[in-house]
Each structure stands twice: as C-alpha cells, then as structure tokens.
Image (cartoon, rainbow, N blue to C red):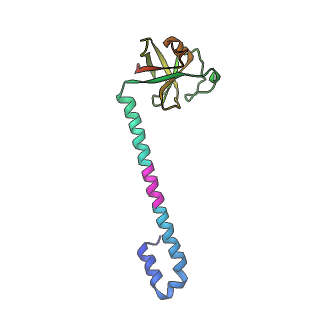
C-alpha cells in the first residue's frame, strides 16, 4: 500500500510523473474513500452497541414498566412468532421488545387493577406507542377487549 508521502514523491519525480500520475492519484483517492468508509462503519458500530447496551440496561435494571398495550388481531392466529412457536389467541402470551423468549411477566391493567401472568413468546410491538402486545386471552382477563388498548404495568416474574 502506498502512503500519501510516497504518492506525492512519485508524482513529483520527473521520470515517473507521466507513468504513475494517474494511478497514484487514483490510489490516494481510493485510500481516502476507504478511510471514510471505515470511520463511518466504526461510528455505526458504536451507535449500535450503545443502543443495544441501553436497551439491555433498561430491561435488567427496571423491573417495572408502564405504558400502552394492545392485543393481537384475530387474523394473526396461527402465524409464527419470533420465538419459533405459533400464535394462539387462547394462550396467555405477550410480545415485548427487549425481554427474552420464555420470560414470565405480570401484566396489570392500571385502569381497573386486574392482572394476569403471561409468557413472552414474540418480539414487538411494532408501534412505538405501546410497550407490549398481548394475546386475546390476556386482553379478556384484563378486560380491555372493547377498548382495544389500555394502560398497563409490567413486572418481571421470572
């Protein structure tokens, strides 16, 4: 690989000027472009790691979360979940963005105080306005089927 100093020396040498000028300038331009790409990748990787670390910290340090919940559409019955199983509306399951598959959580409807334990079996919700999506069985136990969404408190049980 040619350094910038070597490239400038080659360009300024009268005997080599015509022979190496085009290729040397091209190499310098390519090296600069490569350096910019590497810097961009490093910044992107650092942002990804910070994001992942903050997401993990949020999950492990905060045992209680509060936010909106909605329940799955009946059209999703039988679809594959992120954990490898199938969505069954009659099971007590939930989708959460950062909790691992199999985590047991207690979900409490803050409007009426009803609560139920459910198992995380999917990744979600896709809407940033909600912290969980739940199965229809969970929504029925929490008594928010008619409203469609409600405010909940989530606590990790296991």
Q: Quadrant of residue 135?
A: top right
Q: Quadrant of residue 110?
A: top left
Which residue is at 48% across, 30% downward?
129
Residue extending furthest bottom? 15
Picture coordinates of residue 21, whole percent (x, y): 52, 80
Query: Looking at the image, which is closer to me, 101 or 98?
Result: 98
Which residue is at 54% across, 84% downward?
18
Which residue is at 43% across, 11% downward?
112
Q: Quadrant of residue 56?
A: top left
When the figure is inspected, residue 104 is found, relative to residue 20, above or below; the finding is above
Picture coordinates of residue 64, whole percent (x, y): 37, 23
Picture coordinates of residue 86, whole percent (x, y): 61, 23
Side of 92 relative to 154 (left or right): right
When the figure is inspected, residue 90 is found, relative to residue 95, above or below; the finding is above
Picture coordinates of residue 15, whole percent (x, y): 50, 88
The residue range painted magenta reads 36-44
Q: How many numbered dots are placed on residues in this image?
A: 0
Query: Looking at the image, which is closer to me, 127 or 2?
Result: 127
Q: Is residue 94 magenta?
A: no
The quadrant the C terminus occupies is top left
């Amino acid at each position: 690989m040619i350094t910038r100093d070597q490239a400038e020396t080659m360009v300024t040498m009268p005997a080599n000027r015509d022979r190496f000028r085009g290729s040397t300038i091209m190499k310098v331009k390519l090296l600069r472009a490569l350096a910019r790409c590497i810097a961009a990748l490093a910044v992107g990787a650092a942002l990804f790691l910070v994001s992942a670390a903050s997401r993990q910290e949020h999950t492990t340090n905060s045992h209680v979360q509060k936010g909106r919940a909605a329940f799955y559409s009946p059209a999703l019955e039988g679809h594959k979940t992120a954990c490898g199983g199938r969505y069954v509306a009659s099971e007590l399951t939930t989708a959460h963005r950062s909790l691992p598959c199999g985590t047991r959580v207690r979900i409490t409807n803050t409007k009426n105080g009803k609560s139920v334990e459910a198992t995380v079996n999917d990744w979600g919700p896709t809407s940033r306005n909600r912290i969980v999506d739940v199965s229809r069985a969970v929504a029925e136990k929490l008594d928010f089927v008619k409203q469609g969404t409600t405010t909940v408190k989530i606590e990790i049980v296991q």
